[in-house]
Amino acid sequence: MAGVSQPGSPVPARLADIAQQARVSEATVSRVLNGRSGVAAATRQRVLAALDILGYERPVRLRQRSAGLVGLVIPELTNPIFPAFAQVIERALAGYGYTPVLCTQTPGGATEDELVEQLVERGVTGVVFLSGLHADTSADPARYTRLAGRGVPFVLINGFNERIGAPFVSPDDAAASRMAVRHLRELGHRRIGLAVGPHRFVPVRRKVAGFEAAVAEENARGSADGRPVTGVVRHTLFSLEGGQAATAALLDDGCTGVVCGSDMMALGAIRAVRQRGLAVPADVSVIGFDDSQLIAFTDPPLTTVRQPVAAMASAAVHALLEEINGNPVQHTEFVFQPELVVRGSTAAAPAG
């Protein structure tokens, strides 16, 4: 254990503490810290992560040379779902020896094309795009063809475009909308609104298609009282303020249930309901999308459709590494199923 110390303290790290944190044996910790073979890569990564969490410096012998740089291009950091993806992707890349380079777009800052150019100039081994221009139907997909022509492998998350030859990873957005509508209908809501972002984005179009199909299915199934279900769609900005504005319009339309395109929009929806002197969920039920961190602790805890972040991020990294290693994976879309998480923001429709 010599050489493993806590910053600012001469006290050495205890094998037992690291083993408990990493959920492995002390013997395994010893093998990792002494640079011995016979330890699986995933297990080794857990031990190193335990060192970091406990605040101990890694021995010099464990500071391996990076296998290469991998760019991660994301739209922003204000929406907690993007840092959640970034964290899983970076952890997965680090487990294989790659150094992630996080590139964030900001209004007035570098564009996606400019960020990619900087990454290529620095010799990145590959790039992961999260909710980028590939998801915008108004954007020219030729930029990705040019990137492939420069020999840079890449994978795209959230937003499929058949004109781009690369692996795609997406949640089933249509299924997410259907789950939300079905849940509200079971609670007796007959006028249901959908607050989503601009129509030009692929995930938005899929959510709208799933929403409209679900409303049609509920009407085809019929109800005990014979009253139909009405669906209303409002396009807005993907932000808290956007969700608030769209929900205000949906309340004017008489909606008692609101499905939102993101958790941030759902928080805006709750604000709009309260500004009307109404309560969530007694008067209006609200459903989000993502199940980003801390959403379970909002007031009320938010019912949402969970995006399978860990599975999607891991699949994206594995696909990219296969491409980097010269083993191209199928250039198609890998679709992951979301999950409805029922909490306190949905309840039975108000009487009348």
Image: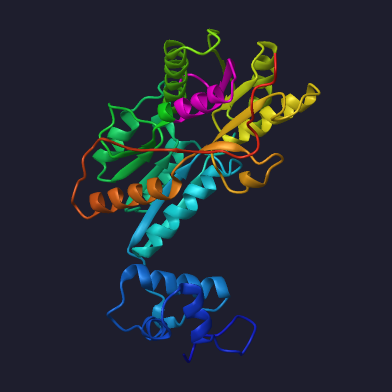
Residue at 55% x, 79% y is 56
**From where the camera sits, is residue 308 visible?**
yes
Could you tell me which quadrant the C terminus lies in? top right
Asked if residue 254 lies left or right of residue 227, the reply is right
Name the residue at 72% across, 24% down.
283
Q: How many marks?
A: 0
Q: Toward which corner of the image does residue 130 lie, by quadrant? A: top left
Task: Report which quarter residue 44 is drawn in.
Answer: bottom left
Which residue occupies 30% across, 52% down? 318
> Farthest residue in the front direction?
224
As drawn, 14 above or below 323 = below
Point out residue 313 in the picture as x, y percentages from the top left corner: 40, 48
The foreground one among 224 and 73 is: 224
Which residue is farthest left? 327
Instruction: Please state which of residues 350 and 175 is positioned toward the viewer in this rendering.
Output: 350
Q: Is residue 189 magenta?
A: yes
Protein image colouring: rainbow
* Nearer the observer, 262 or 230: 230
Find the magenta span and give its range: 176-200
Q: Is residue 222 left or right of residue 39?
A: right
| Residue 142 on image: x %, y % | 31, 28
Residue 330: x percent and y percent? 21, 40
Residue 65 appears in the rendering: no
In the image, farthest residue toward the right: 277
- Residue at the image position 23 percent from the left and 37 percent from the top: 331
Give the image location of residue 197, x and y in percent: 54, 24
* Residue 132 on the magenta segment: no
